[in-house]
Image (cartoon, helix red, strand yellow):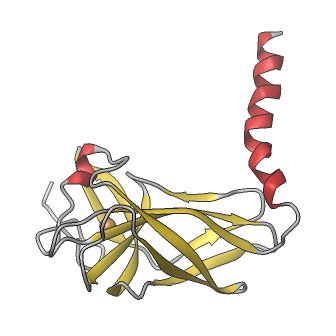
Amino acid sequence: MIRVLLRVFGGLLISAPCIAYAQQTGVQVEHAWSRATVPGQTGVIYLTITDTGAPDRLTSVASPVAASAALHESFSENGVSKMREIAGLAVSPGAPVTLAPGGYHIMLMGLKQPLKQGDAFPVTLTFEKAGPVTANVTVEKPGAGAPAAHDAMGGASMPMPAGGAPGKAP
Ligand SMILES: [Cu+2]
């Protein structure tokens, strides 16, 4: 009996967010947020991608607040938290992709000015089929929602594996 209830409840949790988007088809980018930065620091964006159309693929990211933006993935290797750039991200109907602390994120390199809490700025995600989708990013306080490993992510000093090779020897 308990198992059945859990299954029903779990099903509701998964399907509930889809109801809100049922009237639109295509790719939606929502809940985009960032963190306040200090001068010279790299910016980060987290968001949720929902696809109610055909399977698609996120291929590039850009924002006018930064010289360049890239899709990154955080991962743990031998207990060391690292991140690497990824070429793209597949999205498909019924499987929202969440960029969140400790996982996928958008890195903003060369911020034109520090991000301030309470500010908002646009980010454009370009998909293979849906094309460009722009979302509004709100800036939260420094360190908001961050696991400890991600807090250490700074500017030029951040360890970036080159060509897929680990940044540090095991
Ligand atoms: Cu990163």
* Residue projecting furthest to the right: 23
Question: In which quadrant of this rendering is ligand 1 seen?
Answer: bottom left
**Residue 110 placement (x, y as % from top left):** 24, 84
Q: Residue at x 34, y 49 (%)?
A: 144
The vertical placement of 3 against 147, above or below, is: above
Q: Position of residue 25 (x, y in %)?
A: 83, 72
Quadrant showing the C terminus: bottom left
Q: Residue at x 37, y 46 (%)?
A: 145
Q: Closest to the observer: 163 or 144?
A: 144
Quadrant housing residue 11? top right
Residue 2, position as x, y percentages in the image: 77, 11
Position of 10 relative to 97 (above/below): above
**Residue 82's quadrant in the figure?**
bottom left
Residue 76 in sight from this viewpoint: yes
Q: Residue at x 80, y 61 (%)?
A: 21
Q: Is residue 78 visible?
A: no
Residue 28 relative to residue 76: left or right: right
Task: From the viewer's side, name the closer residue of 119 and 153.
Answer: 119
For the image shown, how many numbered marks are present on the structure? 0
Splitting the image into 4 quarters, where does residue 36 fall? bottom left
Which residue is located at x 17 percent, y 65 percent? 154
Q: Of residues 145 and 78, which is closer to you in this image?
A: 145
Q: Position of residue 78 (x, y in %)?
A: 23, 46
Left or right relative to 48: residue 81: left
